[in-house]
Amino acid sequence: MHESARHIVDLYQRHALAWDRLRQADTGAFAQARLWLERFRQVMGAGREVLDLGCGGGEPVAGYLREHGYALTGVDSSAALLHQCRQRFPEQQWLHADMRGLALDQDFAGILAWNSLFHLSPDDQRAMFAVFERHAAPGCALLFTSGPAAGEAIGQFQGEALYHASLDPGEYCTLLDTHGFEVVQHVSEDPQCCGFTVWLARALDYP
């Protein structure tokens, strides 16, 4: 595992405002992500409770869902980014926590890990599927991004190494199946969504 994996939380805490500004300014990327959020909403059906893992500063994703009447519980390890969430959307619930150990006494109609899961090490990603299962109501929609193939990729943000990792697509399928989800749609390096590899799954209606 690359050394930068151990510093991802600190990086986002140090550069929270720069990251938040970038997310808000990148309107083109969000316009493309909106297509997946609309599919996510369709899978959720009538459910209104959404768990956003790695919510960042709340814009633009949480803002979009709030506008459509969803009740949000956002989780992030950066206190500075959560401060932005609370300033923007004080009526929603924002939790300063590490999503890897999350155990809320609540289940949700939708779970998001948009551009957050892939910052975890491969072993931590594997463990996250139990977290998804623990918080999924029957029929829960799960939307997350990954890399297109197994491996690590080290980017840059504010001059620092930014860690990304992915499992093999077949392993994601196995983990989803093991934890009670079925794949609704999977697109590798989606040309209509900034080249992101996107997974949309649905929790089975029975245990």
Image (tube, rainbow, N blue to C red):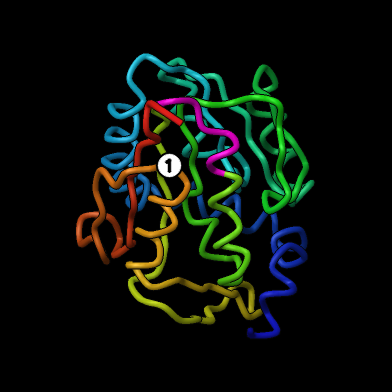
Point out the residue furthest to the bottom here.
2
Q: Residue at x 44, y 20 (%)?
A: 67
Whether 158 is drawn above or below 118: the answer is: below
Secondary structure type for disc 1: loop
Left or right for 114, reference 161: left
Q: Which residues are magenta?
A: 132-138
Left or right for 174, reference 126: left
Image-quadrant location for residue 198: bottom left
What amino acid is labelled 1 in the image?
Answer: Gly
* Residue behind mark 1: 180
Point out the residue furthest to the left here.
191
Of residues 38 and 15, which is closer to you in this image?
A: 38
Left or right for 103, reference 193: right
Whether 45 is drawn above or below 74: the answer is: above
Residue 197 screen position, x and y as percent: 32, 62
- How many other residues sit within 10 Å of disc 1, few (<14), some (14-19) or many (≥20)? many
Whether 195 is drawn above or below 134: the answer is: below
Q: Residue at x 61, y 58 (%)?
A: 127
Q: Residue at x 72, y 38 (%)?
A: 103
Q: How many marks?
A: 1
Residue 207 screen position, x and y as percent: 46, 31
Of residues 18 and 10, which is closer to you in this image?
A: 10
